[in-house]
Amino acid sequence: MWGPYLSERAWGTVREDYSEHGTAWEYFPHDHARSRAFRWNDDGLAGICDERQTFCFSLGLWNGADPILKERIFGLTGNEGNHGEDAKEYWWYTDSTPTHSWMSWRYHYPQREFPYSELVAVNRQLDRSEPEYELADTGVFADDRYWVVTVDYAKASPTDMCMLVSVTNRGADPATLHVLPTLWFRNTWSWGLPGRDDKPEIVADGSELRAQHRILGRLMLQGDGTPVALACDNETNAARLWGYEETPDYPKDGIADHVVHGLPTVNPQGTGTKAALHYVLCVPPGETAQLRLRLSQIAAPGGKARPVPSLGEDFDQVMAARKDEADQYFDWLVPTGTPPAQAQVVREAVAGLMWGKQFYHYDVARWLDGDPASPAPPEGRRFGRNSAWRHMTSFDVISMPDPWEYPWYAAWDLAFHCVALARVDPHFAKEQILLLLRDWYLHPNGQLPAYEWAFGDVNPPVHAWAALRVFEIDGGRDYAFLARVMHKLLLNFTWWVNRKDTGGNNLFEGGFLGLDNVGPFDRSASLPVPGVLEQSDGTAWMAMYALNLLEISLVLATHDRVWTDIATKFLEHFAYIANAASHQGLWDDEDGFFYDLLRRTDGREVPLKVRSVVGLLPLCATTTLSSVTLVRLPEIAARLRWFLTNRPEFTEVVGARRISDGGQQQRLLAVVGPEQLRRILSRMLDPEEFLSDYGLRTLSRAHLDKPYTIRLGGHDYTVGYEPAESNNGLFGGNSNWRGPIWFPTNYLLIEGIRHYARFFHDDLLVEYPTRSGQKMTLDQIADDLSDRLISLFLPDKHGNRPYLPVHPLLGDHPDWTQHLTFPEFFHGDNGLGLGATHQCGWTALVLDLILTRNRPTHHRPTHAR
């Protein structure tokens, strides 16, 4: 019920953008966030809220030097950063159980004035070829003059949260820190909506904040010591922002202005909808001060008051018990014998996943039309961003890609999150899979929403794959879940076939498909010349989609034979797609690789010979079908025999057979046949191409010396190997698929190799690495690729983690290296973490790799194959 569902950033989002031209970053900037009531959801530091975000709790901090109260993480907008949006602070999600019974969070706050203006000004002067200018580069942490702020949360009950705030002075001199634990109600009463004008109240009195809400009942925040209780209203300061005369007496930034500037902007009556306990802590050098806080529901709506929990012995018992239970839980989760450094990665990856769960509210129709009490949105909005998604209403806790940089869900990101989540909370993982398939998310035409910047964009169709993986991780018993998923995915598969196979030839388009700048031009925009771009990855995703739906159908058919007709449909549809991939222009037999194909209206076919992950993804469209399954489902066996007899041209994609060690006959279903497999692997496993010390690059390193250039429509388009941040502005330039290592595609390729290993067993040996003279089985190769990815987070012999930057401040100081973040992607040559710093969703797949590698028998079970 209560958890870390308060976002790290609510400003600069599409939901809060009511501008004429959709300039979200500029319409609601960071400078407005402290003074402006959010419409759709709130944000804060170390924040928690209830599952409907009725109340919010977070920390406010002031070092006595900053011009503003520190209430939220600061960063550059997508238009300010030389590589797009970028958080410019240092914080860590250090622990959490799946129920949030125990959580911890850590933040480093400078004692000098925070260099807001410097960070903006310097980064604006940098171009895309230069690295980002980070907070540590400003020197603000020199001489260790900073605060280590940690918050530990422990639940005494679902609605009783104990909190221990610790602040450590790392500097050489005594220092003072203002700490403001803050409670407020999300503003739901100012928008003129019928039945939602009831205004709650918080009374600030001494060391207590007493709150009353129609839905929540009565809450109390208690603090130890002798803080000063301050109150204002969670209302917009229109005078500061726009010069309006009419503004609340004690607006949202009233507490901040009172603390920082001494202004009379807090309510002397001690009432409002936002309140804080103001502590002034003077801490000697190297010492730690602690605050005890407890937030409790002391009466349900209309119910009798409960005893007020204490901050004494009971508080200590709750903190100790929840910490001990968390330790026991992770001891159970992580297999015995797992190296401690890997166990830490698992635990903190789980923490990142849990802290990445955010309350997400977005009623698209209301957003398009505007609120009764607010100015009408610009007329152009009715035909602009997301105007075709009026049916969509979000009011849920959702796993976000990155709580600051991407505080909104993305369809294919979420699918990968669910695979990692299933390791610790399969129920929540299944809820998340189903969520985007519900009627108020899935478009009536069958399309899945991509992300809030453009719901109509197209992400790879990986929901079926994720549903199957979650089903397996959960023990392979929840057939009702698979059936619910299958019904909706039939609609989505049909949307793909109808909308993204323009030629009706089983070769698919799709646009950027989540791979941003992987091609020589923007694959989601109009083509440089008239024609159709038939995509290797789009076709591979659809072949994989057909296989996933086949596998789900086979599982369901063992309980209800009605699904056999669906299974044969997807068996044959897969064959059509797989055959088309190899015989209609995507496969280049001379290069031994798959490429996108530009099919021009004048009849010319132009392969885009970029050796990228686009050409590796066909490896993921593979599985095996066992004789046990065919015996159990004779209808499938009969249809397969008929199909191969009457359609012999498809034998190469569904006809390969071998006898397994157990005596069963295995049939290989694969886009990439055995001979193609050897040729693609020779490139993929070549250190001069895709194989790096830390996983598989997304672009062949051969393009470093030989960039690919094509001239179309009078313009040259070039793709060169870029191992770090993007050097171009496609899709904002904040992510890069031209060289770095990405976890989602690496994870799928490793899984694809394991599928082939299940078919070939130890009979197929492949040179690994290419030209090394060393032969390995496919399972051994999959293991080694997993180990390379895992090693990104492990200390080397010098104690350095490859993903962390070598920095004179951050290099080997335990404050900066003992805890982990999970970056969006990694440098293709040295493994440095890049992009969003807390991409705890799909990068948290590392926990699945670790748990798999450390089990006695780590090859995955398969069901009804």
Image (cartoon, grey):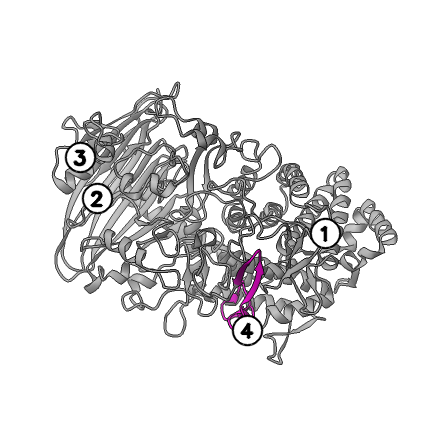
Between the residue at mark 4 and the residue at mark 3, the CA separation in whole angstroms equals 61 Å
Q: Nearer the viewer, residue 414 or 277?
A: 414
Labels 1 and 4: the sequence-earlier one: 1
Query: Residue at 65% of width from left, 61% of height from top?
Result: 607
Residue 4 visible in this rendered orientation of the protein = no
Which secondary structure, mark 2?
A: loop
Q: Residues within 10 Å of mark 1 (few under 14, many from 20)?
A: many
Which secondary structure, mark 1?
A: helix
For residue 664, side relative to residue 246 (left or right): right
Q: Which residue is mark 4?
A: 687
Query: Residue at 70% of width from left, 71% of height from top?
Result: 764
Q: Nearer the viewer, residue 385 or 53?
A: 385
Between the residue at mark 3 and the residue at mark 2, the CA separation in whole angstroms equals 16 Å
Q: Nearer the viewer, mark 1 or mark 3?
A: 1
Q: Which residue is mark 3?
A: 229
Q: Position of residue 375 (x, y in %)?
A: 35, 25
Q: Which residue is mark 2?
A: 69
Between the residue at mark 2 and the residue at mark 4, the CA separation in whole angstroms equals 49 Å
Residue range in magenta is 689-718
Q: Amino acid at mark 1?
A: Ile
- The quadrant in which residue 28 appears is top left
Which numbered dot is residue 577? 1
Where is 123 relative to 679, above or below?
A: above
Between the residue at mark 2 and the residue at mark 1, the CA separation in whole angstroms equals 57 Å
